[in-house]
Image: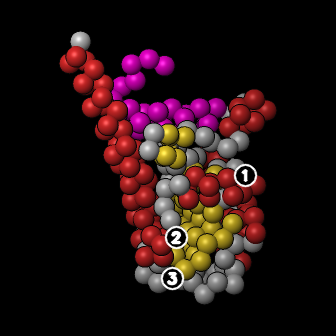
Amino acid sequence: MAGSDSSAAEGADSSGPQILQLKEILRNELIAILDTVGSGAKALVLDRDVSAALSAVVDFAVLREHGVAKMYVLDAGGAGEAEVQGVVYVVQTQVRKLRAVAAQVRAQGGREHSVQLVPRRTLLAERVLEEEGVLGSVALGEFRLDAVPLASDVVSLEQPGTFAALYADGDFGGIASVARGLMRIQGLWGVFPRL
């Protein structure tokens, strides 16, 4: 009996560093994305729904170390006036948001553009960017912001808009994202004993 109590205590003690490991994984993925966009100053344009989760993972000082000179919210007009060589967009895969990105890319010719889709890259996103005429002029990828550590013992699988997309539009993509987040957590902490 005492042996099982001590192993439970060990598991509780190790949860903090493992959550920090998840935070570090997400931070490193974002840094790798930023480092692929030119060597000069960059602008980071965030979807309003993604910005809160991203702020839980990385702070502006780290972004600045990797060339981010300015941060913008997608709805506020983007990085049109910024003196930067590259622009990185981190947005959800919603048609309205992708069209806003495409409009900004067309308006900002001559810059390197990277569009990172949260929580995953979809055919719909590719089709929208292709219809808007910018698919060939952007680097398209995904940023798996599916399991976000909020505290030393709290991980969020929140995907804004998932409930409405599921019940109003019949879009099951949000469920797939939550499942990927759960799989990521199980990869770090082991299989869940019960759900």
Determine whether the residue tagged by mark 1 lies in a helix, strand or loop: helix
State whether residue 137 appears in this view.
no
| Residue 181 lies in the magenta-colored region | yes
Which residue is situated farthest in the bottom direction here? 83
Question: Residue 120's x, y, as percent?
Answer: 54, 47
CA distance for labels 1 and 2: 28 Å
Mark 3: which amino acid?
Ala
Tally of numbered discs: 3
The quadrant where residue 82 appears: bottom right
Residue that carries the numbered disc 2 in the rendered image: 60
The mark lying in front, picked from 2 and 3, is 2
Question: Residue 41's x, y, as percent?
Answer: 51, 82
The mark lying in front, picked from 1 and 2, is 2
Residue that carries the numbered disc 1 in the rendered image: 95
In this picture, is 170 found above or below 133? above
**Looking at the figure, which quarter contains the N terminus?**
top left
Mark 2: which amino acid?
Phe
Query: Depth check: 64 or 183 in front?
Result: 64
CA distance for labels 1 and 3: 28 Å
Range covered by the magenta-colored residues: 172-195
Q: Earlier in the sequence, mark 1 or mark 2?
A: 2
Residue that carries the numbered disc 3 in the rendered image: 41
